[in-house]
Amino acid sequence: MKLQKPKGTADILPVESAKWQYLEEIARAVFKDYNYKEIRTPMFESYELFSRATGETSDIVTKEMYDFEDKGGRHIALRPEGTASAVRAYVENKLYAPEVLKPVKLWYNESMFRYERPQSGRLREFHQFGVECLGVKNAAIDVEIIAMADNYFRQLGISGISLHLNTLGDMSSRKAYREALIAYLTPFESELSEDSRRRLHENPLRVLDSKEPEDIKVVENAPSILDYLNEASQAYFEEVKTLLEALGVEYTVDSNMVRGLDYYNDTIFEFVVKLDGKELTVCGGGRYDGLVEYFDGPATPAFGFGLGIERLLLVAEAQEINFMEDETLDVYVAVMGNHANVEATKVVESLRAQAFQVERDFSNRKLPAQFKTADKLNAELIITLGDNEVQTGNVTVKNNKTRKEVKATLDEIYDSFSPIFEELYVEEEF
């Protein structure tokens, strides 16, 4: 039997992981600018956590959840999304306590798992940056988080991303709209897809989000949530729009946009980009003021988003964004002879302790082959170390770009205050 990775997963090899690290470094820097702190939660949780958060009738629970019974008979699920775990941690660790500064600003970079048909940018194990802000309700928080995502895209150089904005209103507005939507859709029930017929009475707002052609046709003339907002919900949405305009963040109001999870209210948003002629959502989120209380915590307003890393990489590749600098190696040590092997081991460890990135030859190859390796690794300096150099204690250090050579003793190589390397780098600058 040939061993292969599970379907819907991917190996992230070194040449690709460097890109991931770049995305992560920029994300970490942007989130820090906005005073968000990293949280790390378990990869698996109790099944009930996600079934309660996303709704027993949601596709995540009914079709996509990776769940199983562990050896202790507990019903466990792999994390399908990040918000539920963050909220559970918020409640369990009493981050709502009076002495904790509000709002509580959290971010995470985690694997998620959903059993669905693998496709471009969507795997069964996928990765997301997530942001959660808990403890204060203010339209300025909604806008700050949206602006933070927009800022991240701009720092990466991603273009063509548009902000789609909508509101679900408060519970009163949503209830009124739900009744109106059911009344509109019921006469078309037989024309809807199988999933939408099921959703019609369980969660009719999800019908608006369907990608099935027959559903898209039916909802073209569906009533808009914007016509069912009460005064408070309308005022809140207007404030969000006003603040976005004050920051110069362009947006499009999309009244048919909903979120895939049941716990959202008021502001929801998505950042969308066209890829191969189709719209692709790379970031989405919104406000969820009832979820903490639903998890037996105190009433706590909250706002957040999830940003798909695989999808972001797809967009960057399609836009031919080269956000990776050429990797260089500080020093390559060419090794010749058995006696030199011991000294080379000491040299490379000493240089690494001096904060140099160092590689050496381990294969006892001829010097020309080792120099070719140094070129492939884009090494800046080369130290040639053979039995003769070990015996005399003298070595040659060459700048592999300028070809300038400097004679040095092994003691000088070991001395972190030696000016040997500075001499070679100064030559390169000129």
Image: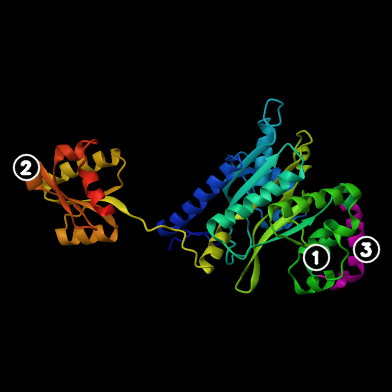
Magenta stretch holds residue 181: yes
How dense is the environment of label 1, judged by Cα within 10 Å: few (below 14), some, or many (20 and up)?
many
* Residue at the spot of label 2: 392
Mark 2: amino acid: Thr
Spot occupied by residue 29 in the image (x, y as percentages of width and height): 53, 45
How dense is the environment of label 3, judged by Cα within 10 Å: few (below 14), some, or many (20 and up)?
some
Task: Quadrant for residue 1, please give it.
Answer: bottom left
SS class of the residue under badge 3? Answer: helix
Mark 3: amino acid: Ala
- From which residue to which does the magenta span run? 174-192
Q: What's the residue at 53%, 68% (across, down)? A: 319
Question: Majority secondary structure of the magenta segment?
Answer: helix
* Residue at the spot of label 3: 183
In the foreground, 406 or 386: 406
Badge 1 or badge 2: first in the primary sequence: 1
Badge 3 or badge 1: first in the primary sequence: 3
Label 1, label 2: how many angstroms apart (C-alpha)?
Answer: 82 Å
Disc number placed over residue 6 in the picture, else none: none
Judged by depth in the image, the label closer to the viewer, 3 or 1, is 3
* Residue at the spot of label 1: 196
C-beta proximity under 8 Å, tags 3 and 1: no
